[in-house]
Image: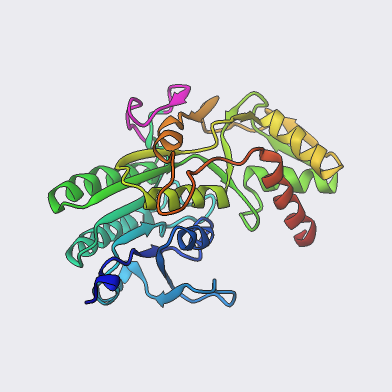
Amino acid sequence: MSPAKASTRRVLVTGATGFIGRHSLAPLQRRGFEVHALARSIPADAAPGVLWHTGDLLTGGARSLLEAVRPTHLLHFAWYAEHGKFWTSAHNLEWLSATLSLLRDFAAAGGTRFVGAGTCAEYDWSGNLYDETVTPLRPATLYGAAKASAFLTGEAFAKTAGIEFAWGRVFHLFGPGEAANRLVPALIRAHLRGESLDCGPENHQRDFLSAASVADAFAALCDREITGAVNIGSGKPRTFRELSDTIARLAGSRGDIRFGAIRDPGPETLVPNVDRLLGETRGEAHGEARWTPPASLEESLSESIAWWRNHL
């Protein structure tokens, strides 16, 4: 292998057509990676310059691909994510097993850095500000438990295998194309149509970040030498009431949002400490500036509102 080829940073992205994965490909290219994307089928609007592969991680379809591609980096998004069902689905057990097998095969193929997508549901939700270095892991759902198990076991294995392991914990993301009954699109649709919507308590507070920004943060994690868990969020929380009022203002119309009409299964405040993300992605790396959250939530919400105007 030539010296030029040996120095190539080659990343394989699993779940590359998913809600976050599809947004990660361009940021990885900008950071100088040769990008390989794995999905069950290649999309019609496949990103230019990306090398696409088909396969199913649940059937062990990645081992031969890893041996052929020999990625230096692996960005793992693939997981069962059907809205309303993923919290309790037994599919979480399948994906836990598939994730650990993928990590093992990646190390065997000579990989050096693994970055996985975790969740705020891994944490003990009895606090207010969630810090990856302090807040204990005490998941209340099967989904959270499976993700936490993947993190703990994956991190321990990576140390024995001599590879870098990072785990981005995602909080509350949104964007065009997400499930219609999730909070942000439900509010958008209610305000655009002037309809009523039952919602959780108005004072419940969350950190909302667009899927594109979340994906860019994961690309930054691939680009650095950060290891361990890293919270991914904007650091600028909003209450349900503030979110709804912002959407109504941007939409130019207002629905009847009945706050407190339904129970929110989460805590009153679910907000990440993002000091580690902001601090350890600071400075230049491979010609790419540090990751920063969007200047305002409004720009990302406007994109989602425009999308729903065309898809109602």
Q: Could you tell me if residue 120 is visible in this image?
A: no
Residue 286: which quarter of the image? bottom left
Q: Position of residue 84 (x, y in %)?
A: 53, 49
Q: Is residue 88 left or right of residue 97?
A: right
Indicate whether 114 appears above or below 278: below
Quarter of the figure that contains the C terminus: bottom right
Q: Position of residue 58 (x, y in %)?
A: 33, 67
Give the residue drawn at x 46%, y 65%.
16
Give the residue drawn at x 61%, y 55%.
178
Count of marks placed on residues: 0
Instruction: Between residue 205 and residue 133, name the one nearer to us.
Output: 133
- The color scheme shown is rainbow
Give the residue drawn at x 80%, y 42%.
250
Indicate whether 205 appears above or below 166: above
Q: Which residues are magenta?
A: 125-139
The secondary structure that dominates the magenta segment is loop
Q: Is residue 193 left or right of residue 131?
A: right
Q: Could you tell me if residue 124 is visible in this image?
A: yes
Give the residue drawn at x 66%, y 39%.
297
Indicate whether 270 appears above or below 62: above
Q: Is residue 141 magenta?
A: no
Quarter of the figure that contains the N terminus: bottom left
Indicate whether 24 appears above or below 188: below
